[in-house]
């Protein structure tokens, strides 16, 4: 989507370059000029209105530096993912770490949702006991006990996600870090069939404005097949209710791929 701006005496007209090219209006004071330096009060009003427009139109605004860092190779896909999560998740939200691993994503999610109310929840799951042990140890040494209490860990495959999410709870974010456990048994990996079922569950549990974030590792046996399954799944979601994209290094075929599924 592209925007063009035109200023009149009463309104800032914003044209969305879409199929219907329909404009919408933002009220401005009479004789307001974005480039005017004569009236500081008017200039401040215009600046604030434009900033609000930017935030409302582009909910992920503020990620420009992170995206540039990824494009120039200065930021890893995992760093980009965490920065995107921070723009989606709010205090008190319900989120899922579908593959806890060593707990670093779980810890990051906890810091995003924790507040004084204790309403937020992080549901973490993994099929390996050692992964849950590592995650639990990391949380115990990194956060206060009252924050630790809002994390629930389950020895469970991510394909059974719906079994642990209470009825009536909608999720803001579900994250997958696929492949094998770093430092663990490389023969134990996520597989396309169960990951596909987990994505279906995540879609059913996701609330409007929520995100499914999938980090796919293609360099190990089975990784490429799982990646193709995820691409097929994302491509089949209806465009009226989902926005799906990916971040992929074309000249680094073994680099991880970040796939994002955003529910409108």
Image: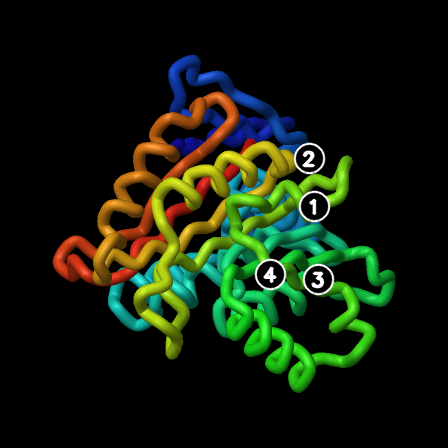
Q: Dot 4 corresponds to which residue? A: 155
Which of the marked residues, 1 or 4, is nearer the chain's N terminus? 4
User: Label 4 to label 2, Cα distance in Å?
Assistant: 59 Å
Q: Residues within 10 Å of mark 4 (few under 14, many from 20)?
A: some
Secondary structure beneath label 3:
strand
List x then y, in percent, for residue 193. 38, 40
Q: Is residue 74 left or right of residue 95?
A: left
User: Label 3 to label 4, Cα distance in Å?
Assistant: 10 Å
Identify which residue is drawn at 60% across, 71% down: 107
For discs 1 and 2, the disc positioned in front in the rendered view: 1
User: Label 1 to label 3, Cα distance in Å?
Assistant: 10 Å
Identify which residue is drawn at 52% across, 74% down: 130
Identify which residue is drawn at 47% across, 54% down: 176
Location of the N terminus by quadrant is top left
Q: Dot 3 corresponds to which residue? A: 152
The image quadrant of residue 97 is bottom right
Q: Residues within 10 Å of mark 2 (few under 14, many from 20)?
A: some
Q: Dot 1 corresponds to which residue? A: 165
For discs 4 and 2, the disc positioned in front in the rendered view: 4
- Residues tagged 1 and 3 counted as in contact (Cβ below 8 A): no
Which of the marked residues, 1 or 2, is nearer the chain's N terminus? 2
Secondary structure beneath label 4:
strand
The image quadrant of residue 196 is top left
User: Label 1 to label 2, Cα distance in Å?
Assistant: 49 Å
Q: Is residue 9 above or below residue 99?
A: above
């Amino acid at each position: 989507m592209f925007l063009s701006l035109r200023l009149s005496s009463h309104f800032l007209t914003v044209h969305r370059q879409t199929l219907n090219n329909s404009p919408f209006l933002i009220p401005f004071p009479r004789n307001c000029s974005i480039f005017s330096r004569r009236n500081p009060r008017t200039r401040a009003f215009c600046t604030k209105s434009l900033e609000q427009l930017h935030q409302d139109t582009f909910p992920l605004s503020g990620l420009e530096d992170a995206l540039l860092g990824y494009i120039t190779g200065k930021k890893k896909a995992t760093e980009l993912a965490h920065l995107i999560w921070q723009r989606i998740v709010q205090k008190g939200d319900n989120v899922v770490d579908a593959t806890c691993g060593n707990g670093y994503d779980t810890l990051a999610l906890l810091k995003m949702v924790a507040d004084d109310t204790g309403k937020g929840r992080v549901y973490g799951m993994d099929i390996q006991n050692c992964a849950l042990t590592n995650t639990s140890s990391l949380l115990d040494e990194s956060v206060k006990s009252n924050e630790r209490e809002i994390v629930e860990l389950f020895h469970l495959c991510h394909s059974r996600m719906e079994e642990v999410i209470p009825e009536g709870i909608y999720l803001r974010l579900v994250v997958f870090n696929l492949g094998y456990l770093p430092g663990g048994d490389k023969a134990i990996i996520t597989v396309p069939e169960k990951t596909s079922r987990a994505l279906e569950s995540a879609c059913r549990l996701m609330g409007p404005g929520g995100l499914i974030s999938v980090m796919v590792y293609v360099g190990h046996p089975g990784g490429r097949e799982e990646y193709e399954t995820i691409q097929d799944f994302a491509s089949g979601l209806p465009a009226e209710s989902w926005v799906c994209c990916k971040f992929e290094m074309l000249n680094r075929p073994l680099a991880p791929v970040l796939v994002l599924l955003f529910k409108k």
